[in-house]
Amino acid sequence: MATTALDALDKTFTLAVRLAELTHTALAERGLTTARAELLLVLNQRGPSVQRELSQALRCTPRYVTGLVDSLEGAQLVSRQPHPTDRRATLVSLTQAGKRTAARMATERQQAALDLFGELPPAQVSAYVATINHVLDHLAGAPDAAGPG
Amino acid sequence: MATTALDALDKTFTLAVRLAELTHTALAERGLTTARAELLLVLNQRGPSVQRELSQALRCTPRYVTGLVDSLEGAQLVSRQPHPTDRRATLVSLTQAGKRTAARMATERQQAALDLFGELPPAQVSAYVATINHVLDHLAGAPDAAGPG
DNA sequence: TATTGTTATACTCTATAACTATA
DNA sequence: TATAGTTATAGAGTATAACAATA
């Protein structure tokens, strides 16, 4: 039914905006932005990385990674070391504080997931994920299908 | 089950990012940004409006509305008229081209909704919307519940 | 000659503050 | 004195281009 499909798209946008606002403020409280937090998470997953790798993982320019690492280094969440074999490259790794921050973000994300979805019957959550997967498949297949919201 | 809740949150973020990217590029192709498109949609819903009203509707500063209206006026999608009774105020309304653009955006949004959700059984779409409503209710109740993603 | 990171520069989005005209 | 809009300015996020050191 047409009305329901439009409802679904509208609600999806509403939730997206709401989640973006909340993550933005939650991160801002500890001096982080989305890009900086993502860099921490990437380092947490991959371990020490060269800046070029980070720019590929975050899909941003190498120049921008320089700025992100500068600010995170200033906050003592990451540190730069010379690359052991390639003297052009810089190795970036989490400090102890950076590891704690990344771990805490992971914990809070888990807690938020439980707060938001934990009360629902597992079948409903599975159906929700299945619906999103369907939408994502559609978007992957026809990458220009989404109109403005 | 814990894993499923986290999956649901992750998928929600993935979809949000994907939809944001797509709307951004779709709007950029016709020289629009999210804020400019929203202004057109607000004018389409409310009819001619004073800039102060627009700044409240878009939750941005009056100064920023000036810039948005400047650019949309430059694109001949909106026009400014003197307010009939309050000579301090400016009335902003859609031009014919602006009306066409707003109408086309509405049509495309409807089409996108059908593309993305139209194939699914109505019951699944309803359950999806119900799930989002549950999450939105939770976010409204405990506005700091979402952790970083 | 190609690659890593950086300095220099610029553009977009958005905000605050000070100001003008009007109420 | 308060309100509507604008000029001036600023800051965050992100990009491109040119350049140095190294491969």
Image (cartoon, coloured by chain):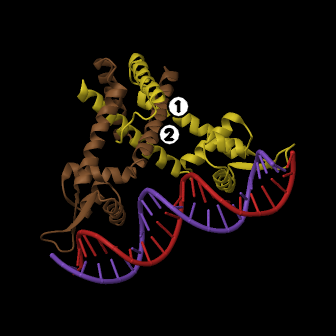
Chain colours: A yellow, B brown, C purple, D red
Quadrant of image for the C terminus of chain A: top left
Q: Are marks 1 and 2 on the same chain?
A: no
Is the C-beta separation of discs 1 and 2 under 8 Å? yes
Relative to A21, A11 lies left or right: left
- As drawn, the label of residue B147 is 2
Relative to C9, B114 lies left or right: left
Identity of the residue drawn at 31% across and 32% down: B111
Residue A50: quadrant of the picture: top right
Q: Which amino acid, by three-letter code, is at mark 1?
A: Gln
Instruction: Tell me the SS state at disc 2.
Output: loop
Residue B136: quadrant of the picture: top left
Q: Chain of mark 2?
A: B
Q: Position of residue A110 (x, y in %)?
A: 52, 31
Quadrant of image for the N terminus of chain A: top left
Local crowd at mark 1 within 10 Å, few (<14), some, or many (≥20)?
A: many
Q: Position of residue B119 (x, y in %)?
A: 34, 20
Q: Which residue is mark 1?
A: A110
Identity of the residue drawn at 31% across and 37% down: B109
Q: Chain of mark 1?
A: A
